Amino acid sequence: MFKKSEKKKQPTHLDLLDSEQADSARAQLSAVECGKVVPRHQAKVIGRISAIRIVPRGQSQWLEVVIKDDTGIVNGWFFGRNSIPGMIPGVNALFEGLVQLDEGEMTIANPYYEFI
């Protein structure tokens, strides 16, 4: 029905870091790959924001942001927030905080974050 556009997208700072750049950023910032985080330990991870959603719970809500790299995913939960300026899919970010295992997924509640 619909044809995909033949245009090639120009790379931007929003694109996923290539492996070499990601490894360099991890080394400089003492971060680990998403797939190497351990529950109940502090971690600093770098990845690309792949999904964002607002999770309603009773009369409150939180923003769930998923970052991923080649090794896995980590969820960031921002309680009481429905948006964060600049936090959009495709942006490379660093999350830092205490990792917890929630229903089989690695999660950091209210992580410190930076855009890479």
Image: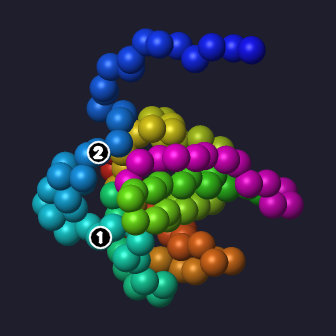
Q: Which mark is residue 17?
A: 2
Res. 81 in view:
no
Question: What is the distance, in whole Å, between disc 2 and disc 1 at their CAs?
Answer: 14 Å
Res. 102 in view:
yes
In the rendered image, residue 63 lying in the magenta stretch gets the answer no
Q: Residue furthest right?
A: 58
For badge 1, the amino acid type reads: Val
Taking the spot 43% from the left edge, 83% from the top edge, the residue there is: 38
Provide residue 14's location: percent of width, then percent of height. 36, 33
In the image shown, does 47 or 5 lie closer to the viewer?
5
- Crowding at mark 2 (Cα within 10 Å: few <14, some 14-19, many 20+): some
* Residue 97 versus residue 61 in the image, above or below: below
Quarter-wise, where is residue 42 in the image?
bottom left
Q: Main secondary structure of the magenta part?
A: strand
* Residue 1 versus residue 94 in the image, above or below: above
In the image shown, does 14 or 5 lie closer to the viewer?
5
Q: Residue furthest bottom?
A: 40
Provide residue 39's location: percent of width, then percent of height. 48, 84
Mark closest to the chain's N terminus, 2 or 1: 2
Residue ID for mark 1: 32
Q: How is the image coloured?
A: rainbow
For badge 2, the amino acid type reads: Leu
Boundaries of the magenta span: 47-59
SS category of the residue bearing label 2: loop
With 66 as the anchor, is 42 left or right in this view? Answer: left
Taking the spot 29% from the left edge, 32% from the top edge, the residue there is: 13
- Crowding at mark 1 (Cα within 10 Å: few <14, some 14-19, many 20+): some
